Image (tube, rainbow, N blue to C red):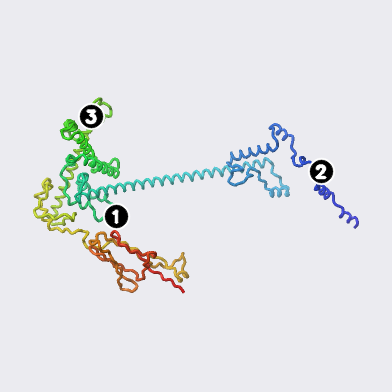
C-alpha cells in the first residue's frame, strides 16, 4: 500500500517533461522551431533561382493562379464563389481518418493527379454545355427579335399606307367642299372631272373608307355639279403666273399622295393625270417667264412643235427614247441644249395628248351618266337622287347651259319639269332618333351578408351600380335650347323610365332603368353636360351602409 501511495504521489516522466517544456527557457532558439527543415534539393533550387522560400511560395501561388485563370477563367480574387483559397487543395479529413483507421491504402500522388484530371475534364464538359446553351439561347433571341422586327415592319407599312390613303381621301374631301361651296381653286377645277367620273364605285369606297364615316360627304354633293368642258391644258393657259405657281405646289401634293398610295410604279389614271398636269403647268410658267405671246420661248416652242405634227403616239414615244439616248450618250455635241429643249417640248406635247384623252374619257362617262338618268325618267323608274339641298329648283324650260349642247343632250329629255316637282328636303331635317352610347356599370356589394358568405375567389352576384349615357345631337335646328332628360314611372315600382328630349329634328328616346336614388355629387361620379352636340349623363346609385 505504501508503494502504491508513493507511485501516486510521484509525478510521471511525461508530466515532468511537459511541465519543463511549458516553462520559459533562456536558451530558446526561435529559428530552430519556426523554420521548416529543407532538403538538399530544395536548397539547390532556391540557390539556382536566387530566391527565398517565401518568394518561391509566392511565385508558385502566382503560377497556380495563372493556370487556373487560363483554364477556368477564375482566380482567388475574382471568382463567382467569393473563395480566396480557390487554388488550395481540398482535403477530406474525415475520409482520410476513416481510411487510416480501416488500414485502407492511402491515395498516392499519381492517383490524386488522375482524379484531378478527371474532375477537370468533367468541368470542361460542363463549361462546353453551358456555352452551347448560351449560344442556343442567343440564337433563339436573335430569331425572335428578327421575327418581331419583320412583324413590326409589316405593321408599319400597313399603317403608313392607311395613313396616306386617309390623307388622300381628306384631300378629295377638301376639294369637293370648295367646289360645292363655290370657292374653288385652280386645282379644284382640274380635279373636278376626275372626282366626278375618274373614280369607279369600288375605288371611291376604298379611297374614302375610314373608321368613322361622316354623315355629310362632299363627294356625294358633287353629283349635281356640271362637268368641266374645257380641256385642262387650255384652262392652264388662262391662269396668271401667281396662280400657276400656287397650282404647281398643289399638283405636287396630289402627285406625292397618289405615289404613296399606289407605290412608286403607280400607272393609274389619276397618277398619269397629275403627272401630265405637272409637265404642262411647268411649261406654262416657263412660257410666261419667257415673254408670253410673241416672246422668245413661244417662237422656239412653235418651231419645235412643227416636228411633232402628223406623228402618231407610238412614233413620238420612239422619238423621245432616241433623243434621250442621244443626250445621255453625248452624241448631241454642241447641240445638246437644243436637243434638251426638243425633249422638254416633246414631253409637254405627250402630256397634252394624254390630258386630251383623259378629258374625252371623262366627257364620255358624263354622257353615259346623262343617258342613264334620262332613261330612268322616261321609264318612270327610280326618283332622281338629290345631292345639293341649297340648289334652287330649275324652272320649266330653263336653259341647262352649254354642257347639254356640247354633249348633244338638249333635245333628248326635259330635266326642268322633273326637277321642278322634286322634293328638296334635307336629310338633316328629317325626324329621326339620335345616336347614343349606353353603358351599365355593375359590381359587387360587399355588405355584411356577402362578406360572411362570399370571398374574392367566390364573389357574390353582381348588381347594377349606375349608368352612362352619351346622346348625340349634332344637327339641332334650335341650338339655343339645351336637351333635357325626364324621370317617368314605369310598369313596375322597381324600375323607371329615363326619357331624353332635345327638339326637332330629333325624336325622344327612353330607357328603362332601376328606380334607385342617384348620387348627385361630382366626387361620386355624377356628370350631366351638353357640349359640342353631345349630351353626357353619368350617375351612380347611392349606397346605404348600416351603422349602429
Query: 99 and 65: which one is in front?
Result: 65
Measuring from the top left, give residue 270's x and y in whole percent.
Answer: 24, 43
Helix, strand, or loop for circle 2?
Answer: loop
Indicate which disc residue 196 carries: none
Vertical arrangement, residue 541 with respect to residue 220, above or below: below
Q: Is residue 391 left or right of residue 53?
A: left
> Residue at image x 34%, y 48%?
159
Question: Closer to the observer: label 3 or label 2?
Answer: 2
Q: Give the Cα distance between marks 3 and 2.
A: 123 Å
Indicate which disc residue 26 carries: 2
Helix, strand, or loop for circle 1?
Answer: loop
Which residue is disc 3 drawn over? 339
Which residue is disc 1 drawn over? 212
Q: Residues within 10 Å of mark 1 (few under 14, many from 20)?
A: few
Examine the image and state in which quarter residue 39 appears: top right
Vertical arrangement, residue 430 with respect to residue 202, above or below: below
Measuring from the top left, give residue 161's x and y in whole percent.
Answer: 32, 46
Query: 180 and 288: which one is in front?
Result: 288
Amino acid at each position: 500500500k505504501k508503494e502504491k501511495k508513493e507511485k501516486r504521489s510521484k509525478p510521471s516522466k511525461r508530466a515532468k517533461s511537459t511541465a519543463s517544456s511549458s516553462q520559459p527557457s533562456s536558451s530558446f532558439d526561435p529559428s530552430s522551431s519556426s523554420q521548416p527543415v529543407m532538403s538538399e534539393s530544395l536548397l539547390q533550387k532556391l540557390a539556382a533561382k536566387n530566391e527565398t522560400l517565401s518568394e518561391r511560395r509566392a511565385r508558385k501561388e502566382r503560377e497556380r493562379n495563372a493556370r487556373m485563370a487560363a483554364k477556368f477563367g477564375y482566380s482567388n480574387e475574382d471568382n463567382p464563389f467569393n473563395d480566396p483559397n480557390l487554388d488550395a487543395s481540398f482535403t477530406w479529413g474525415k475520409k482520410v481518418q476513416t481510411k487510416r483507421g480501416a488500414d485502407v491504402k492511402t491515395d498516392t500522388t499519381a492517383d490524386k493527379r488522375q482524379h484531378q484530371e478527371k474532375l477537370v475534364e468533367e468541368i470542361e464538359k460542363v463549361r462546353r454545355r453551358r456555352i452551347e446553351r448560351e449560344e442556343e439561347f442567343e440564337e433563339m433571341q436573335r430569331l425572335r427579335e428578327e421575327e418581331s422586327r419583320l412583324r413590326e415592319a409589316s405593321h408599319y407599312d400597313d399603317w403608313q399606307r392607311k395613313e396616306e390613303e386617309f390623307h388622300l381621301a381628306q384631300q378629295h374631301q377638301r376639294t369637293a367642299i370648295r367646289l360645292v361651296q363655290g370657292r374653288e381653286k385652280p386645282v379644284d377645277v382640274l380635279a373636278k372631272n376626275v372626282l366626278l367620273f375618274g373614280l369607279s364605285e369600288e375605288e371611291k369606297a376604298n379611297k374614302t373608307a375610314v373608321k368613322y364615316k361622316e354623315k355629310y360627304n362632299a363627294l356625294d354633293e358633287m353629283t349635281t355639279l356640271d362637268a368641266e368642258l374645257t380641256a385642262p391644258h387650255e384652262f392652264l393657259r388662262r391662269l396668271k403666273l401667281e396662280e400657276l405657281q400656287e397650282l404647281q405646289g398643289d399638283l405636287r401634293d396630289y402627285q406625292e399622295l397618289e405615289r404613296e398610295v399606289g407605290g412608286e410604279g403607280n400607272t393609274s389614271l389619276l397618277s398619269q393625270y397629275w403627272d401630265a398636269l405637272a409637265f404642262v403647268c411647268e411649261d406654262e410658267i416657263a412660257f410666261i417667264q419667257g415673254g408670253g405671246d410673241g416672246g422668245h420661248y413661244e417662237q422656239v416652242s412653235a418651231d419645235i412643235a412643227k416636228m411633232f405634227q402628223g406623228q402618231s403616239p407610238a412614233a413620238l414615244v420612239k422619238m423621245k427614247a432616241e433623243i434621250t439616248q442621244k443626250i445621255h450618250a453625248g452624241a448631241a455635241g454642241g447641240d445638246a441644249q437644243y436637243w434638251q429643249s426638243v425633249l422638254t417640248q416633246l414631253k409637254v406635247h405627250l402630256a397634252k395628248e394624254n390630258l386630251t384623252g383623259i378629258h374625252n374619257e371623262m366627257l364620255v362617262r358624263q354622257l353615259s351618266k346623262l343617258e342613264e338618268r334620262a332613261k330612268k325618267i322616261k321609264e318612270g323608274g327610280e326618283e332622281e337622287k338629290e345631292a345639293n339641298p341649297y340648289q334652287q329648283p330649275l324652272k320649266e324650260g330653263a336653259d341647262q347651259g352649254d354642257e347639254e349642247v356640247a354633249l348633244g343632250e338638249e333635245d333628248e329629255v326635259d330635266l326642268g319639269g322633273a326637277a321642278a316637282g322634286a322634293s328638296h328636303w334635307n336629310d338633316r331635317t328629317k325626324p329621326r332618333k339620335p345616336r347614343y352610347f349606353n353603358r351599365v356599370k355593375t359590381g359587387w356589394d360587399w355588405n355584411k351578408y356577402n362578406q360572411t358568405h362570399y370571398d374574392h375567389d367566390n364573389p357574390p352576384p353582381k348588381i347594377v351600380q349606375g349608368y352612362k349615357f352619351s346622346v348625340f345631337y349634332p344637327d339641332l335646328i334650335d341650338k339655343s335650347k339645351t336637351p333635357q332628360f325626364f324621370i317617368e314611372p314605369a310598369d313596375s315600382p322597381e324600375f323607371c323610365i329615363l326619357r331624353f328630349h332635345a327638339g326637332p329634328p330629333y325624336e325622344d328616346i327612353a330607357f328603362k332603368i332601376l328606380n334607385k336614388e342617384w348620387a348627385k355629387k361630382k366626387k361620386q361620379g355624377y356628370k350631366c353636360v351638353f357640349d359640342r352636340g353631345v349630351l353626357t349623363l353619368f350617375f351612380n346609385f347611392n349606397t346605404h351602409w348600416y351603422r349602429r
